[in-house]
């Protein structure tokens, strides 16, 4: 599979762009564990143009994480074009257009998934951004605004005609937000459309290696993109790759997983200081599936979210490490 001049191995797995999640420390870990493509947090075109420092900081990329994309969102042609030109100067491997974010502060202003209610404007933005920059331009969107407006099969062709070089489809409507189950049926229909020749990337509810494999096998997508299932779990890419490549790697141990989370913490603290580094990391810790088996974990989660020093978080993780290892030893003893 290729996007522009970017060549990927068979069945690549991408990290989705997510605000306050896909900072550079997390992207680097996901890359180490096998993510074929990573994306920055999505950034506002208006904020880029106004040179808002916090937004420009989100666009800092390292060569070690390539290929890397920068995703932008906005609600008018001129600002999206101007922002794309500025983004191009950072030298991402591609620019992705966010036509799918469902949250009110984005979609409610006519950007992101809000453009699903104004397809002519969406297409005008896509066409003009493609013509304004030299890097590949891709897009990410949803099935439609709601169940009465499932427009993705026609929209995919229209975006392709605008020059979009790959399309990521989240298998929900805007009205669904992140509720219910992602519907991959229409994603498969888009991929099987003989008029579609750009890569189609499937997104939505890729929560395990088995689900990722089924997405490739049943729907024929060129790549899958993982979002929320990566929270506190960058090793999911390793697990998925092991399944897809039939390498049968043993799962990481409890110690190894805890050490990965501590590494993420230290990367962020070294990068942006203790306080902000902890803020960037603790939502991953609180959401990590690693801790689901801990009894009465709610108290521990609250402690994670309130922790303000590296020492506090390290102690909490070490306590979790001990409990998880004791549980694992008990299960092993029972199975003898």
Image (cartoon, helix red, strand yellow):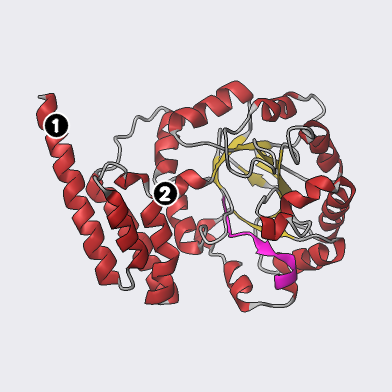
Binning the other alpha carbons within 10 Å of mark 1 as few (below 14), some (14 to 19) or many (20 upward) gives few
Give the labeled residue for mark 1.
332
Looking at the rendered image, the quarter that the N terminus falls into is top right
Q: Residue at x 61, y 67 (%)?
A: 59
In the figure, 11 relative to 76: above or below?
Answer: above
* SS for dot 1: helix
Q: Residue at x 62, y 78 (%)?
A: 53
In the figure, 17 relative to 201: above or below?
Answer: below
Of labels 1 and 2, earlier in sequence is 2
Quadrant for residue 108, please give it.
bottom right
| Range drawn in magenta | 38-47
Binning the other alpha carbons within 10 Å of mark 2 as few (below 14), some (14 to 19) or many (20 upward) gives many
Looking at the rendered image, the quarter that the C terminus falls into is top left
From the viewer's perspective, tell me whether residue 328 is left or right of residue 153: left
In the figure, 179 relative to 259: above or below?
Answer: above
Give the labeled residue for mark 2.
234
Whole-number angstrom distance, CA of label 1 to CA of label 2:
26 Å
Quadrant for residue 333, please give it.
top left
Q: Which mark is residue 117?
A: none
* Residue 284 screen position, x and y as percent: 41, 56
* Residue 268 screen position, x and y as percent: 41, 68
* SS for dot 2: loop
| Residue placed most toward the observer, 302 or 316 | 302
**Residue 14 visible in the snapshot:** yes
Q: Residue at x 42, y 30 (%)?
A: 243
């Amino acid at each position: 599979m290729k996007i522009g001049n970017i060549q990927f191995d068979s069945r690549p797995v991408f990290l989705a762009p997510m605000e306050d999640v896909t900072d550079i420390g997390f992207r680097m870990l996901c890359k180490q564990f096998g993510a074929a493509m990573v994306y920055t947090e999505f950034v506002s075109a208006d904020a880029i143009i106004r040179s808002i420092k916090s937004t420009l900081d989100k666009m800092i990329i390292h060569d070690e994480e390539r290929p890397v994309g920068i995703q932008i969102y906005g609600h008018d042609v001129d600002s999206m074009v101007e922002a794309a030109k500025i983004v191009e100067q950072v030298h991402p491997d591609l620019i992705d257009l966010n036509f799918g974010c469902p949250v009110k502060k984005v979609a409610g202003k006519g950007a992101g998934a809000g453009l699903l209610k104004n397809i002519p404007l969406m297409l005008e933005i896509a066409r003009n951004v493609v013509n304004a920059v030299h890097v590949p331009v891709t897009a990410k969107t949803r099935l439609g605004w709601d169940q009465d407006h499932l427009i993705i099969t026609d929209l995919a062709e229209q975006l392709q005609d605008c020059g979009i070089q790959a399309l990521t489809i989240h298998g929900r409507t805007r009205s669904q937000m992140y509720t219910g189950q992602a519907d991959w049926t229409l994603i498969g229909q888009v991929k099987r459309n003989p008029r579609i020749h750009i890569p189609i990337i499937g997104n939505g509810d890729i929560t395990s290696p088995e689900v990722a494999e089924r997405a490739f096998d049943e729907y024929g997508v060129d790549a899958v993109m993982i979002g929320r299932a990566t929270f506190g779990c960058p090793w999911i890419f390793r697990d998925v790759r092991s399944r897809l490549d039939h390498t049968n790697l043993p799962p990481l141990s409890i110690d190894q997983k805890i050490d990965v989370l501590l590494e993420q913490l230290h990367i962020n603290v070294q990068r942006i200081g203790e306080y902000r580094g902890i803020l960037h990391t603790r939502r991953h810790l609180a959401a990590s599936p690693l801790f689901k088996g801990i009894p009465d974990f709610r108290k521990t989660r609250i402690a994670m979210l309130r922790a303000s020093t590296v020492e506090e978080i390290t102690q909490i993780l070490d306590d979790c490490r001990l409990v998880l290892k004791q549980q694992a030893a008990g299960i092993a003893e029972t199975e003898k």
